[in-house]
């Protein structure tokens, strides 16, 4: 089944009991047991819920994995994946990764002696050199947030397999509609499903998919033990959002390409980060492993333009955290999404103070360009 159909009919397709075309919302905390030790497959909704299971089966089908798990947020999914490791282990992580992923390692897991190191994962030789005896996983984003750096998933997964360690890929920006890391050798895929999978800025959710029975048993144990599960209603909302993923992403990408070309040629813009542009250093690798460039654009405003005035100038586009909704969102990584990363690290990797991240929505693309152009004109220092 092609993915456009799988998005709608994957997982649990409707309700066999009533014939309803949508999976019901099983808004229950517990389940009747016919006798001691005998139930219908569910006993308590932290452990398992039919609506959540339908979502978990759906994301597993879409990613081509062994099993999927739904969490209360993307960070809950990432946290659960990191709980697979123990004190003294080390994780290599992409060096311009999402600030929340850095923060949970640096401020939480560090307290339990789980080590990490920021590495340019687009440099396979460097990654190979960094794999020491205590490294147990390589955690990558591709494209990274916010600099859109591309990592060759297949090559990194090959390095990991040679050393007997795990490859974890955050696939939030691409979604399984555009990129399938498990098919490229990854062991675990995580999503902030709040973003494109939900698609409407009306829920917070996280998903994780694993490629083996062994990892499935371990991750389910962590999910059940720590309890950061997604509730039935948000599971249902997320299934509904996923059904329209293909048509939304096609429009997102069309608009993003249009805006990237506009920004690339605008005199106010010093640099554009978008893997759909042929001069992007990761263009060929991304084209090989993904079916589209996505809809996140980062760009650097020239020094002669005032970034505060620029943000005041946008009207149609919303200044706010998050990304991946039908509406366009714009943010300032240095003070918003990546504020938890120390300034010296931000500067070193390229998250400079005049960097802007744009999540391109599905509005009329000419209206979006007009809004940005007006803000750019307003921001010029006189």
Image (cartoon, rainbow, N blue to C red):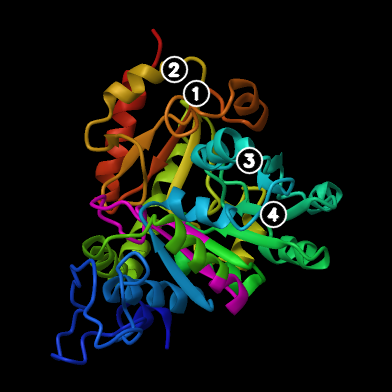
Relative to residue 48, is residue 97 depicted above or below? above
Q: Position of residue 259 (x, y in %)?
A: 40, 45
Mark 4 vs mark 1, foreground winner is 4
Query: Callout 4: helix, strand or loop?
Result: strand
The answer to which image quadrant residue 376 occupies is top left
**Which residue is the site of mark 3?**
112
Residue 176 falls left or right of residue 202: right
Earlier-in-chain disc, 3 versus 2: 3
**Which residue is the site of mark 4?**
138
The answer to which image quadrant residue 369 occupies is top left
The N terminus - image quarter? bottom left
Q: Position of residue 80 (x, y in %)?
A: 51, 55
In the rendered structure, are the residues bearing label 1 and label 2 in contact, judged by CB atoms less than 8 Å apart? yes
Earlier-in-chain disc, 3 versus 1: 3
**Which residue is the site of mark 2?**
305
Mark 4 vs mark 2, foreground winner is 4
Structural distance between the alpha carbons of marks 3 and 1? 35 Å
- Which portion, as a residue range, is magenta? 190-217
């Amino acid at each position: 089944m092609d993915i456009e159909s799988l998005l709608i009919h994957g997982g649990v397709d409707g309700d066999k009991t009533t014939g309803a075309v949508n999976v019901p919302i099983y808004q229950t905390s517990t389940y009747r047991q016919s006798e001691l030790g005998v139930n219908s497959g569910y006993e308590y909704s932290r452990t398992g819920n039919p609506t959540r299971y339908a979502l978990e089966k759906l994301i597993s089908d879409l990613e081509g994995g062994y099993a999927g798990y739904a969490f209360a947020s993307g960070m809950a999914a990432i946290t659960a994946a990191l709980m697979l490791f123990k004190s003294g282990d080390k994780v290599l992580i992409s060096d311009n990764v999402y600030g929340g992923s850095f923060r949970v390692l640096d401020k939480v897991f560090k307290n339990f002696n789980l080590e990490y190191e920021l590495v340019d994962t687009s440099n396979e030789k460097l990654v190979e050199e960094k794999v020491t005896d205590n490294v147990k996983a390589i955690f990558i984003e591709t494209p990274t947030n916010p600099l859109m750096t591309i990592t060759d998933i297949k090559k990194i997964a090959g390095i990991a397999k040679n050393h007997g360690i795990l490859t974890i890929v955050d696939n939030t920006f691409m979604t399984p509609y555009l990129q399938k890391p498990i098919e490229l050798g990854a062991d675990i895929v995580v999503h902030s499903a709040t973003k494109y999978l939900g698609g409407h800025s009306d829920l917070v959710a996280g998903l994780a998919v694993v490629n083996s029975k062994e990892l499935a048993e371990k991750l389910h144990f962590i999910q059940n033990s720590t309890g950061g599960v997604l509730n039935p209603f948000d599971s249902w909302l997320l299934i509904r959002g996923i059904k329209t993923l293909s048509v939304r992403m096609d429009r997102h990408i069309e608009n993003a390409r249009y805006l990237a070309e506009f920004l690339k040629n605008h005199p106010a813009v010093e640099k554009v980060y978008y893997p759909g542009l042929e001069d992007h250093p990761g263009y060929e690798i991304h084209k090989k492993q993904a079916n589209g460039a996505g809809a996140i654009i980062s760009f650097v405003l020239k020094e002669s333009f005032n970034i505060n005035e620029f943000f005041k100038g946008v009207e149609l586009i919303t200044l706010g955290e998050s990304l991946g909704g039908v509406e366009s969102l714009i943010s300032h990584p240095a003070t918003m999404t990546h504020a938890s990363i120390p300034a010296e690290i931000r500067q070193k990797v390229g998250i400079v103070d005049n960097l802007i991240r744009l999540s391109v929505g599905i509005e009329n693309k000419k209206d979006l360009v007009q809004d940005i152009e007006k803000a750019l004109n307003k921001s010029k220092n006189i």
